Amino acid sequence: MTTPVVTRFAPSPTGYLHIGGARTALFNWLYARHFGGKMLLRIEDTDRARSTDDAIEAILDGLRWLGLEWDDDVVYQHTRATRHAEIADQMLASGNAYRCYCSPQELAEMREKARSEGNPVLYDGTWRDRDPADAPAGVDPVIRLKAPRTGETLIDDLVQGPVVTANEQLDDLILLRSDGSPTYMLSVVVDDHDMAVTHVVRGDDHLTNAARQALIYKAMDWPLPEFAHIPLIHGPDGAKLSKRHGALGVDAYRLMGYLPHAMRNYLVRLGWSHGDEEIISLEDMISWFDLNAVGRAPARFDFAKLENLNGHYIRASEDAVLSAAVADLLPDIGQEASMPEALTTEEGRIFVDAMPALKERAKTLVGLAASGAFLFARRPIPMDDKAGQLLTGDARQILARLTVPLGQTEPWTLEAVEAALRDFAERENLKLGQIAQPLRAALTGSTASPGIFDVLALLGRDETLRRIADQAA
């Protein structure tokens, strides 16, 4: 019987869920779902001084927002310290580990000697074969792995291919510190084994750890999981991803108005591909995803591509769903007072009705909210600088004359207001733009909005005439 696939996402809660971590979680989730397995979540919070409850909540919220629900209960690594120490003791008993009594000064001298001789900075095995009876009094030892000194360690990585490390380059790493606390290397291996993880999918910054961790598996005679080290995400310029490139927390993207399914689609294409497919449904992601299609080169983050993709998903979304998403976002970006909170109100329905016109140009939910804010603005409409410059004396006189045909337009439909505006332009011997631009400014306070006929139809005759009257000469 084939062993079911079990992956894990194991973030450290010392900060937000950054974009690279989100992609790692997505790849783990998709691989597990593709094979009908599980993705487990482990919070690696052994650094108690830097781990915070807020960071843990940010990680959990970010995963939920992306739709990446984990299986089983969350494992908190710090609660398993006793189990980690137990394994170190087993390695002591089997002769695969030993106590080291070197002082910090001795270790510093050891490192300095290696550097001066041009050798790798590795522990020299001072206590590897010494009699514990020689131990200095009153010194709490660390426990070190007795690593092999000859031969090679092979990691047959599912992304990077075979990675061979000479064992002489791997020193006797510390398993337990002198205070009895486990190190990262030990904790990760024990937890992955106990959680029955079959595939360790993580960033390639952990590739050098794989060989060291493999030695712990071997010392315990445990089966080695499959490793897949995915390249990191770089900025568009090829440099390491920074905040200016987009190295932000997942919640920051939510607040900028990106849709979770658009974010998911964008992340899956960062380092993985399926032919030339750009727009990929969740069902297809699960069906198509495999680690053999993950590239070895770093992926490049591109805000413009993300915005275009988000715009696609906005246009493809149902109007009521989009309106609800905007309403949910407004309190978090401090704009709840500018638009209706409940879609059951008459004003809320106006926003839903306006959605076909609003979403055509929108790249984000924030932009969508901004473009629809004119619907709920209170008179007199505040003007931005560019809009104010359009309302010249001549423009105001044109608007005043326009109120007559608009007041006579019946019924007030998109087609009727378009016909009225075009007839007026022809009678006045004006180009449509000479009317539409100041009219847009008067009705929305901006030079950017949906099409002017949509604006008129959405506002209704009475509100349109009142707003024109506020600005007309």
Image (spheres, grey):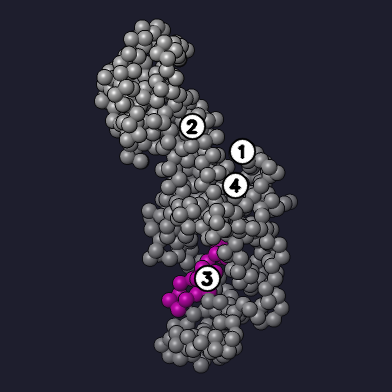
Question: What distance separates the C-alpha of mark 2 from that of mark 1?
Answer: 18 Å
Left/right of residue 57 with respect to residue 167 in the rendered view: left
Q: Which residues are magenta?
A: 175-193
Give the x, y percent position of residue 128.
58, 86
Q: Residues within 10 Å of mark 1 (few under 14, many from 20)?
A: some
Give the x, y percent position of residue 43.
48, 57
Residue named by callout 2: 361
Left/right of residue 150 with respect to residue 20 in the rendered view: right
Residue lying at 57% horizontally and 74% vertically, measured from the top left: 90
Q: Secondary structure at mark 4?
A: helix
Question: What distance separates the C-alpha of mark 2 from that of mark 4?
Answer: 25 Å
Q: Secondary structure at mark 1?
A: loop
Q: Please state, as top left, top right, bottom left or bottom right, where the C terminus lies in the image.
A: top left
Residue lying at 36% horizontally and 7% vertically, measured from the top left: 408
| Comes first in the chain, label 3 or label 4 | 3
Give the x, y percent position of residue 179.
43, 76
The three-letter amino acid code for the residue at tag 4 is Val
| Comes first in the chain, label 3 or label 2 | 3
Residue named by callout 1: 279
| Residue closest to the eye, 219 or 188 | 188
